[in-house]
Amino acid sequence: MNKHSVLIVGAGLAGLFLALKLAPRRCVVLSQAPVGQASASSWAQGGLAAALAPGDNAALHADDTVKAGAGLVDPAVARLIADEGPARVLDLIALGVPFDRTPDGALAQSLEAAHSRPRVVRVSGDLAGRAIMDALTSAARAAPHIEIIENKRARALLRDVNGRVCGVLCDGGETFEADEVVLATGGVGGLYAVTTNPVEAMGQGFAMAARIGALIADPEFVQFHPTAIDIGRDPAPLATEALRGEGAHIVNGAGDAFVSDLAARDVVARAIHIERQAGRGAFLDAREAMGAHFPDAFPTVFAACMSAGLDPRTAPIPIAPAAHYHMGGIATDVWGRTSIEGLWAVGECASTGAHGANRLASNSLLEAVVFAGRIAARLRDDAPQSPRAPEPTTAPPSLADQPRAELRKLMEAHAGVVRDGAGLGQALARVHALSEIHGQANALVASQLILSAAFARTESRGAHFRSDYPDDHAPHRTFIAAGRDVAAAS
Ligand code: SIN
């Protein structure tokens, strides 16, 4: 048994930034892999949205966030992240993140879809995630108040006799107890056959919280990035939206444009899905926009293309939508508190109300650092709590390779860019059968939540498109606790 003050489960951007901000309060960060590996944050290409440019401001940024979210963004949360974003960017600069600069030394700002103006800070074109994670990892490894424990996968939350969360149970039955537990476990892309996320991202934290009855919000809203590079790799490499911001165009196999390049992400993803289904193919043509500058301007995208023998300076890039970001997750308040005492959630596994039905590009890193900062403030300033000893808990089974592969295909086919009631019902029945055969693995619990909420939402809104219900109704969020639909609020 290991007993700690604050236990942070997950070592991506949200987990490490929170750990750093907690100083001097001691904390332990549990990472399921060596830090920096199996972390979606490291792969982020676009950057971080923050209203830093002359002529921009938090109200304009919040307005774009609300519009992109298709009626389900909480405007107060949109404003909060927009207000606090610039200060968090300065924190990252102080930690050594070398954001790109203009020739006169100002922060360079790039344009991404559905932003009314350029406001995304990047690093060397498409290396923001890597550069931010490198800076945070070095700082966290050097910080005396942080202990990082690698290669530990949490499987279940521990609770005391009062129901307060007091630790986690890991693979092999090892337990880590703590006064406060923060889930920063990332998203659900690994539940899908085509994803830009690490395949390990199968909604573990989200399922662990749901199992103990934590309030879950909007699980049906999974964002599909329109321009994953279709070269048969798993996970699929991303061709950042910033390429379109720099003038690259989406075309079909005949070279014809079929969607506005910088329309909202859900609109572009659906158009590409339809074009591919119709056999016309979809490509990102950056030949004219980038030309010979491609390797310097977007080194990650260039390397991914070249690894498949495709030179994006001379050929269009084949693209497909891919599961990219979970807008839904563990419901939190504006301080990152969940509905269960002692449990906090931050980053992609949380649902704060910032993203609604469709996240605005580059708002995910922003939300992660803003909420990590807010949780750290509470955990530093609130009176320390001492939970009682944990009650006995058994770990859910892990899912073997074969059912896992089947689950990924099932989610891709029935809970993807375009859904319908018949397919969702069929997938739900199969997930139920898989749970009977293999036990209630976290990946099956997470899938069941996504599928059942998608089945219940008989409308189309943002990233959730139902071909049998193509119109929207009055906006409402989904809230589920202990497997039951508990509320529907606008
Ligand atoms: C991208 O670079 O296109 C992805 C950015 C994001 O998901 O916000």
Image (cartoon, rainbow, N blue to C red):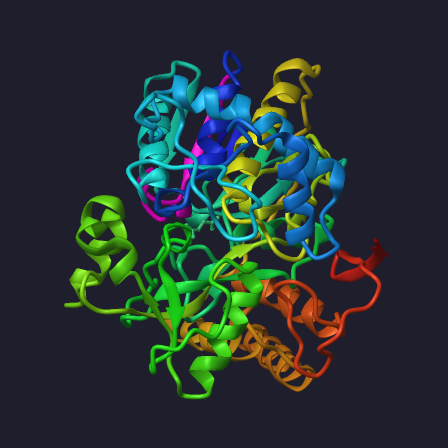
Residue 160 can be seen in this image: no
Residue 407 appears left or right of 341: left
Residue at x 38% of width, y 37% of height: 122
- Report if residue 37 lies within the magenta region: yes
The picture places residue 11, in percent across and down from the top left corner, at: 42, 37
For image coordinates 21% across by 69% down, the residue present is 315
Magenta part mainly helix, strand or loop?
loop
For the record, the magenta segment spans: 26-40
Residue 157 position (above or below residue 264): above
What residue appears at the point 25 percent right and 62 percent down from the top-left corner? 287
- Looking at the image, the residue that sits furthest to the top is 24
Q: Is 169 or 81 nearer to us in this picture? A: 81
Q: Is residue 332 left or right of residue 442?
A: right
Q: Quadrant of residue 228?
A: bottom left
Image: 114 above or below 364: below
Q: In the image, residue 361 lies at what x, y percent?
A: 52, 49
Where is residue 344 shown, x and y percent of the image?
Answer: 64, 35
In the image, 155: left or right of 327?
left
**Is residue 468 rendered to the left or right of residue 181?**
right
Q: Nearer the viewer, residue 452 or 483?
A: 452
